[in-house]
Amino acid sequence: MASSGDGRVLDDAEVEGLDRWWRAANYLAVGQIYLMGDDPLLTRPLAAESTKPRLLGHWGTTPGLNLLWAHANRCVRERDLEAMFVTGPGHGGPAIVASTWLEGTWSDVYPDVTRDAAGMGKLFRQFSFPGGIPSHVAADVPGSIHEGGELGYSLAHAHGAAFDDPDLVVFCVVGDGEAETGPLQASWQSTAFVDAARDGAVLPVLHLNGWKIANPTTLARLSDQDLVAHLGGRGYAPVVVEGPLEGETSADVHRRLAAALDDCLDGIAAIQARARGRTRAGADDAEVTDAADVPRWPLLVLRTPKGWTGPQEVDGSRVEGTWRAHQVPISEVRGDEDARRQLEAWMRSYRPEELFTEDGVPQQDLLDMVPPRGRRMSDDPRTNGGSVSRPLRLTDFRRHAVEVREPGGSVHSPTTVLGDWLAEVARDNGTTFRLFGPDEVASNRLQAVVEAVGRAWAVRGDAEDDRMRPSGRVMEVLSEHLLQGWLEGYLLTGRHGVLTSYEAFIHIVDSMVNQHAKWLKVTSQLPWRDPLPSLNYLLSSHVWRQDHNGFSHQDPGFLDHVANKKAEIARIYLPPDANTLLSTMDHCLRSRHYINVVVAGKQMVHDYLPVQEAVEHCARGLGIWDWASTDEGEEPDVVIASAGDVPTLEALAAVDLVRTHLPELKVRFVNVVDLMRLQSDREHPHGLSDAEFDTVFTHDRPVVFAFHGYPSLVHRLTYKRTNHASFHVRGFIEEGTTTTPFDMVSSNETDRFRLAVDVIDHVPGLVPRYAALRQRLLDARRRAREFAYLHGEDPPEISGWRWPHGGVHHPMPGGRDGAPLAAAADDAGDRPG
Amino acid sequence: MASSGDGRVLDDAEVEGLDRWWRAANYLAVGQIYLMGDDPLLTRPLAAESTKPRLLGHWGTTPGLNLLWAHANRCVRERDLEAMFVTGPGHGGPAIVASTWLEGTWSDVYPDVTRDAAGMGKLFRQFSFPGGIPSHVAADVPGSIHEGGELGYSLAHAHGAAFDDPDLVVFCVVGDGEAETGPLQASWQSTAFVDAARDGAVLPVLHLNGWKIANPTTLARLSDQDLVAHLGGRGYAPVVVEGPLEGETSADVHRRLAAALDDCLDGIAAIQARARGRTRAGADDAEVTDAADVPRWPLLVLRTPKGWTGPQEVDGSRVEGTWRAHQVPISEVRGDEDARRQLEAWMRSYRPEELFTEDGVPQQDLLDMVPPRGRRMSDDPRTNGGSVSRPLRLTDFRRHAVEVREPGGSVHSPTTVLGDWLAEVARDNGTTFRLFGPDEVASNRLQAVVEAVGRAWAVRGDAEDDRMRPSGRVMEVLSEHLLQGWLEGYLLTGRHGVLTSYEAFIHIVDSMVNQHAKWLKVTSQLPWRDPLPSLNYLLSSHVWRQDHNGFSHQDPGFLDHVANKKAEIARIYLPPDANTLLSTMDHCLRSRHYINVVVAGKQMVHDYLPVQEAVEHCARGLGIWDWASTDEGEEPDVVIASAGDVPTLEALAAVDLVRTHLPELKVRFVNVVDLMRLQSDREHPHGLSDAEFDTVFTHDRPVVFAFHGYPSLVHRLTYKRTNHASFHVRGFIEEGTTTTPFDMVSSNETDRFRLAVDVIDHVPGLVPRYAALRQRLLDARRRAREFAYLHGEDPPEISGWRWPHGGVHHPMPGGRDGAPLAAAADDAGDRPG
């Protein structure tokens, strides 16, 4: 970053230039909100039909955003910054669109919207108009990585963008409405994770315009002293600019704002120079142990009136500087002549004739303020992250595969196995990959990644800290919102990452996932936006293995949430063992523009597939496991299917029970890794055709399906399939507590005994023949639970059960050891007729 | 609140008493985590089989919670407080269970767990044990309104509990891990909404023990100076207590903590006395205009070592005061003799023989510290909110009903109509009802409530503030998390409320809804917990009418989320007009222990049902609208169904098209208000029996269903129904932007023309006969959209369309005005054969 004219006071021409840009942008913003565009320069008195019939937009935040863009732009030019502008109050779309057009970028991206009167007319008309562009700073706006619709994520996105990009400065405008949200407030913690040596900088601008839609904001009512204490205590060095004060003109505000911005950017430069000097001196991976070494990052607080320069008063009520300026300050301009005259006077107050040529081209002095290509905030290539993204360097995961001599013959913790490979990924992609988790990375058995690349921590350290340093690459903070926001910002600027979380609590970011899914959907339809690295979730400590924390930690509904997203975006994977998890994650890290949800346990589970088979199984997405089936290619009597690690264990144990006690039954075992394979290929790109589906799941045989999540999801994905009426799905039915693993599955009717009973119940003709066996299965289940209630752990024949059925037998009361229970049932004369 | 012994220093006996309680609670906590309970007093050397085989619990936070409970209890006794204890770090279950048992409340509620050695044994065994109690401060714990599993909501719950309860003091422990979450950070704003005169007080205790599971916490690494500035700037008066300092014993910490607590409670008393004096003096509804009048609420920051009094070191690593103390500091105590000896030494370090009699009864001095019944934090009746809850006084909503002379003959904004009645509800229930919304109450047309009872605002006011005062009862802050947390706290203590929000953004609280649903489910199974007032959502500005804000504001998936909850808890209502909305909300406000989700528009919609018919329709939940049907009691050719206001409009317009152009077709029109009626009565208490369902939806006729949300939800609810294969559901398919209302529905293939085409496509035999009509319907749809793209608004025949088909006709190109298009099709010789 070039050094600044520290302490320099702007001269009058500079101030006038800033003001002219501001006026131009304000004019263009009002035009977008109000005008049809037939006479954008107001060469004639404003006619009714030149105004839009439906006024959809937000004025209130717009002049403040225009002001900040103009000033940020001055800094970009003077300091030759590589800068990005993140607009927290994204409803101020007209502002960002205006400056982007002034910079020429809008016309670069949308050549029909030229930088002249004709283009200005189109610019006005397209805004919030059918077939045009949205009212917010949506994906359609070049230079934007942040729509801001929901409010709350700007600062997290800004930091995500800045990580590992030392030359970047992100101007991040935080609205004071937005600042009330939890996610935004959590984001103030971000500085504790910024490595001044290796990361870029974020300059937050807390824009206090005092009001939301109808209410004041809590922060705006704090005194400057309280505000500075509040944000300063959190680790910032806040600078407050308020204006216009009594008797001031906008020129005074320009002067003070420019000086404050220079101070902030000088402060950033000083922090970075110090840290980078230290790094060059070799003090690289040291923890920060001295509080004095913790940087106080600059932060600008800007107090300006909401809707500044807009109408002072409408219909006798004050508008400028109040909540009434939030949206469209003057309505009914079509039908009401007086209102239209007021609008016209407002627009003319910017003196457009001084700002644009008769042809509607910005005057040369404005054009001179536009930074060169590649330095404009509207065309920074990072903001089209897909265009700058490089694929990850991925070592062959097969080298980390576990050896599988026979299916079920050994056990591993899938996430531990994955962790060793992910550690390599993290090490080999030292500036383009990070792992994010809410204090659960170690708990989720991914400690190897921590050991390889450390945890990020740029504030005071402690001797007991486990591998925490500014350059650490595992990001842990107890805010899923912040993690998600960071990761999104990182992906949106072309880098890669994985977010690992307890399954139940990923719901915390449901709404953020919605917004990102919408961003992916819209950008996939914009030819100039390149596909982004995928958003990857690794959900461990899942619903079935939260026996430790209990019911509050048990919820598999995120799968349902993601399944509602556009089919071309949503992917859900349920690898049943370590090797399938490796293969799945490798696939996800190579993919683009998806939301990949991978659910995998951290507890020991059986290894089923040697790595090559695992790869093939994952490529197919679902498949028949011959070694667990007894149909030998014929039409089976029953299909037992599973998706998810624990359900697969129970389903295989059920197969074992059936093979032992109902040996004459032809069983087909199907495992599903890629859940969307269940859907039709008409509904989802991963879907099986109906013919393929029928080949696997038969036309009419009962399918007993053990599912990881809520059973309704499988029904929803398969209800149009030929054999859907024969699907009997077991899964989580909201029963759970702190208990044993078997008690969890049996409370939810998804245990091996229940599944075996389901086979008896649904294969025609078995119920009367095997009533005794059925009862003994239920007795066995009851006994297993009683054992747990007595001893506090599952009986060894449950917890130690392995495929293939080995030395430890199922606790089938009444069954002779080793003797098939079906025979016992027959013995008892249980067969009717 | 009684006045305190201001400045008084505790004498040695008092300190010793506090320490003894603390030691007793710590002993009981460790016993719960580790012991089977056969020898709870350790009369013998600790045997392997006396320890639990699976160690599930959290030690780290526990001694701090025990310390705070002991000290809060002293204040309760000395000041005769009505107090509640909210445990943010809810994983510290062993602590709260311990003190609740010491107070005798545990045995009151669970008589088999007596306050003696036998009961202590059961207490130990039941913890985190199959068939026992969860590891967290779950609903099973008397005195708890807050499980704390997810972390983040303690302070919001505490404030919700304190609203309108002037005699209550809530001690709210906020963990420093929890304090990193967004929702918790948003909750610091709560004081801006506390009326010192009419509300109770919350004393937040920010407990910094420095570590989470594996990471330090960001707040713990701030200096005291920064912490005080940060929280002080936000409006608190923080007091920091750290201990034990070098060379100190626990007695020193007790002394300083007691003094700090006294200071805090004195501060609260002073704030309240001042405000209440002012109120008595008649300065009742004044805005706070002087910043000096804004109270600085006390806040205690407590720094103590994580796992204090636990093992110093295990296997060569420091444990006390580090993240290693988080969970179970010594594992493998069954198998490892040394580990077991260390555990035993740890437990004996509390000298249980001094604390309990040989019979395991707490010594008399401990019993003497227990406040009288009704004053114990463990038995405050508010914490069993259902037991103290009174029904709302509800005026007859029928008086606010709109007159409906003929279906569709007039239009109203449903939420505006509702607002007038809700204003009465708010006025008539001045201390037991509040309306919560994220700055959208006016936007959602509920302004009448604001006008009736004002908005809460206890900080600096402004002349332009719209009815904001400390006593206001509409709660608006731009944090759905905070609103949801407040409302939950308010409901959990027996009061009533409604949360209104934009539909898309209620997803922000998905995870909080999960936790509340779990609380409702568990408490419904605890006979001593009484049913709570329902959690009511009014979702307006819904998916179909966010043409203003665009795609980011369009998401109906909250319905899917809630439909995953236990059937006995989840209710979803989609009233199609003003009168049905009134009836629905009346029902919801009378109900208990549900989560009621009501989706209703704020825009003008047709009035369909006179109020008595509306009441009957809502009671049935779904029904045939004869006036819109042409089947006259016979088996129809097609069923056209709808759920939701906009889909009902489009479905009725489709009926109109069909009646006009396919007059020979027998159409049945069905409207669904109570979505769960679609489910089977085997699945949901509101479900229709299969026979009833078939009577309405027929056995085999095509059902063209226009749905408010994602189509899959209707399929999921109906897939077991006889006629499910004939259900053709239209709804939101993730298409949308800033556009016109008709463009929204047609983008999502849910418009009147598409529905009419669906009728042609699915009634057997119509496609060949009506190919021309079909094409003209599609042309009409295209033209309507083209009109919008040209003019920026929907064509008048769309936007002005009313049932019954009146003066304005559908824009059917090629159709002769007024002439049935079916005839035109016939004319064209379109009928084959």
Image (spheres, coloured by chain):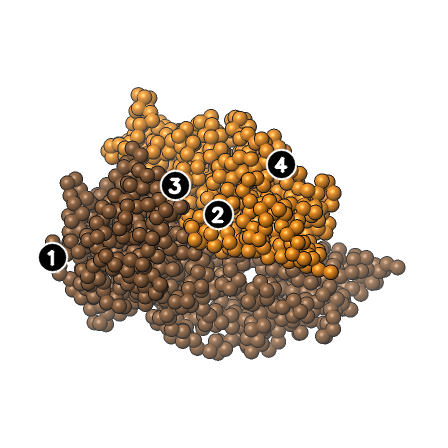
Chain colours: A brown, B orange
Side of B293 where A6 appears, left or right: left
Image quarter where the N terminus of chain A lies is: bottom left
Query: Closest to the observer: B771 or A765?
Result: B771
Instruction: Estimate how packed mark 3 is, as few (under 14), some (14 to 19) or many (20 or more) residues with alpha carbons within 10 Å.
Output: many
Which amino acid does the dot numbered 4 rest on? His
Side of B579 where B690 appears, left or right: right
Q: Quadrant of residue B166?
A: top left
Q: Residue at x 40, y 32 (%)?
A: B450
Marks 4 and 3: in contact by CB < 8 Å? no
A653 to B198, vertically: above or below: below
Q: CA distance from mark 1 to mark 4?
A: 73 Å
Q: Please, which chain is the residue tagged with disc 4 on?
A: B
Q: Is residue B581 visible?
A: no
Q: Please, which chain is the residue tagged with disc 3 on?
A: B
Q: Is residue A168 visible?
A: yes
B331 to B29, vertically: above or below: below
Q: Which of pointers 3 and 4 lies earlier in the amino acid sequence?
A: 3
Q: CA distance from mark 3 to mark 4?
A: 32 Å
SS label for mark 3: loop
Q: Quadrant of residue A375?
A: bottom left
Q: Residue at x 62, y 73 (%)?
A: A407
Which amino acid does the dot numbered 3 rest on? Asp
A431 to A119, vertically: above or below: below
SS label for mark 4: helix
Residue at numbered disc 3: B439
SS label for mark 1: loop
Marks 1 and 3: in contact by CB < 8 Å? no
